[in-house]
Image: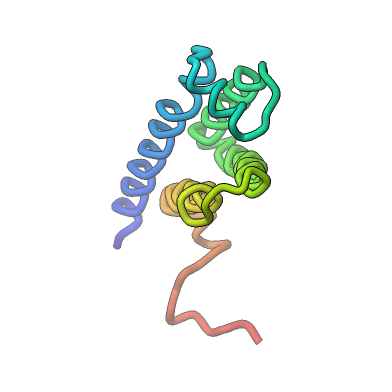
C-alpha cells in the first residue's frame, strides 16, 4: 500500500474511532443520560463521576484528532482504557466481550494513528524484509 493510501486509511480508522467514542461513551456522559450513571453504578463507581470521565474522554479524543498532539492523546487514552479494563476486571465482567474491549479499542485507535503517521511507522515498522534485531 502506498503512503497516500495508508494515510487515508488511517484517517478513516481515526474517524471511526472518534465517532464511536463520541457516540457511545462521551455523549451519554456529558448529557448526563441515565444509562451512563446506571452503567457506572453497576461497575461500582459512586454517583457523579460519569460527567467528569466524559469530559476527560472528550479531551482525549480532541487531543488524538489534532495531528500535533495525536501521540500524546493516544498514550493518555491508553491510560484511560487501562483503568476501564481494571474496572471491568474488578466488576467480574466477561473476558472477551467486556474486559478485553478496551484492548480492542486501543489497538483500533493505534492502528489508525500508525497508518496516518509516517514517523510512527518508522519507529514501529512492520516490514518482513527488515532483519531481526539480535
Q: Position of residue 127 (x, y in %)?
A: 44, 74
Residue 122 placement, left or right of 43 = left
Q: Is residue 117 visible?
A: no
- Give coordinates of residue 116: x percent, y percent: 42, 48
Q: Nearer the viewer, residue 6 or 95?
A: 95
Colouring used for the render: rainbow
Q: Nearer the viewer, residue 39 or 84?
A: 39
The residue under the point 48% across, 21% down is 35
> Residue furthest toward the right?
46
Give the position of the C terminus as an image quadrant: bottom right
Which residue: 53% across, 84% down?
A: 131
Kindly give the residue lying farthest to the top in the view shown: 31
Q: Residue at x 58, y 43 (%)?
A: 74
Judge from the rendering whether residue 101 lies leftward or rightward of residue 85; answer left or right: left
Q: How many marks?
A: 0
**Is residue 86 among what the camera can see?**
yes
Q: Residue furthest bottom?
A: 134
Residue drawn at (44%, 27%), measured in percent from left and top? 22
Q: Is residue 45 above or below residue 108?
A: above
Q: Is residue 55 above or below residue 106?
A: above
Position of 39 relative to 83 (above/below) = above
The image shows residue 60 at horizontal and vertical percentages of 58, 31
Q: Quadrant of the N terminus?
A: bottom left
Quarter of the figure with residue 91: top right
Amino acid at each position: 500500500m502506498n503512503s497516500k493510501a495508508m494515510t487515508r486509511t488511517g484517517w478513516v480508522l481515526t474517524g471511526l474511532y472518534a465517532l464511536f467514542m463520541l457516540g457511545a461513551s462521551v455523549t451519554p456522559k456529558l448529557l448526563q443520560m441515565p444509562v451512563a450513571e446506571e452503567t457506572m453504578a453497576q461497575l461500582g463507581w459512586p454517583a457523579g463521576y460519569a460527567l467528569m470521565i466524559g469530559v476527560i474522554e472528550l479531551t482525549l479524543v480532541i487531543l488524538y484528532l489534532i495531528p500535533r498532539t495525536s501521540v500524546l492523546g493516544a498514550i493518555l487514552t491508553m491510560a484511560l482504557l487501562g483503568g476501564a479494563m481494571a474496572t471491568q476486571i474488578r466488576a467480574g465482567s466477561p473476558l472477551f466481550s467486556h474486559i478485553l474491549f478496551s484492548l480492542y479499542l486501543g489497538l483500533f485507535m493505534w492502528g489508525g494513528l500508525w497508518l496516518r503517521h509516517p514517523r510512527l511507522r518508522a519507529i514501529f515498522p512492520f516490514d518482513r524484509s527488515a532483519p531481526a534485531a539480535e
